[in-house]
Amino acid sequence: MNPWSRIALIGAAAVVAFDTLASFAARTAGIPYVWASLGSFFLYAAVGYLAARASLNKQVRVAALAGLAVGLTDATVGCLYLG
């Protein structure tokens, strides 16, 4: 497994965990769930940056692929809101 693909996989798991925690926090504390989008944006940026740094060449392509993997995970698994 490439270092950047490992970063993308960890990032996808982090997004799912973050969305789960944000969902429970929004429901419990009554905070609007839309505020969690700032945390998701930070995770996307961090995964893209770290994946590009881990790549020896084709850094923009690798960052885009890592962002695609995290985004697809967030759009499918991460959006399963319990309410």
Image (spheres, helix red, strand yellow):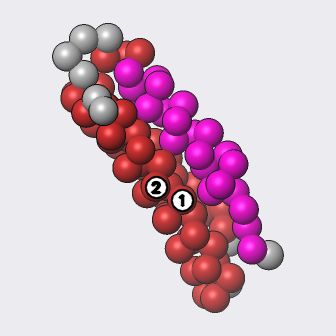
**Residue at point 40%, 39% (across, down):** 8
From the image, tell me which residue sits under label 1: 16
- For the stretch drawn in magenta, the main secondary structure is helix
The numbered dot on residue 13 is 2
Q: Residue furthest right?
A: 83
- Viewport quadrant of the C terminus: bottom right
**Residue 42 seen from this side:** no
Element type at marker 1?
helix
Residue 15 screen position, x and y as percent: 50, 55
**Residue drawn at (62%, 39%) of the image:** 72
Residue type at numbered disc 2: Ala
Position above or below: 71 against 83? above
**Disc 2 residue crowd, few under 14, some 14–19, many 20+, Cα 10 Å:** some
* Cα–Cα span, label 1 and label 2: 5 Å
**Which residue sits at x=52%, y=36%?**
69
Find the magenta span and give its range: 62-82
Looking at numbered disc 1 in the image, what kind of residue is underneath it? Answer: Val
Instruction: Name the outermost residue toward the bottom.
Output: 28
Question: x%, y% of residue 23?
Answer: 63, 73
Q: Is residue 80 magenta?
A: yes
In this rendering, position of residue 4 left or right of residue 9: left
Q: Is residue 44 above or below residue 52?
A: below
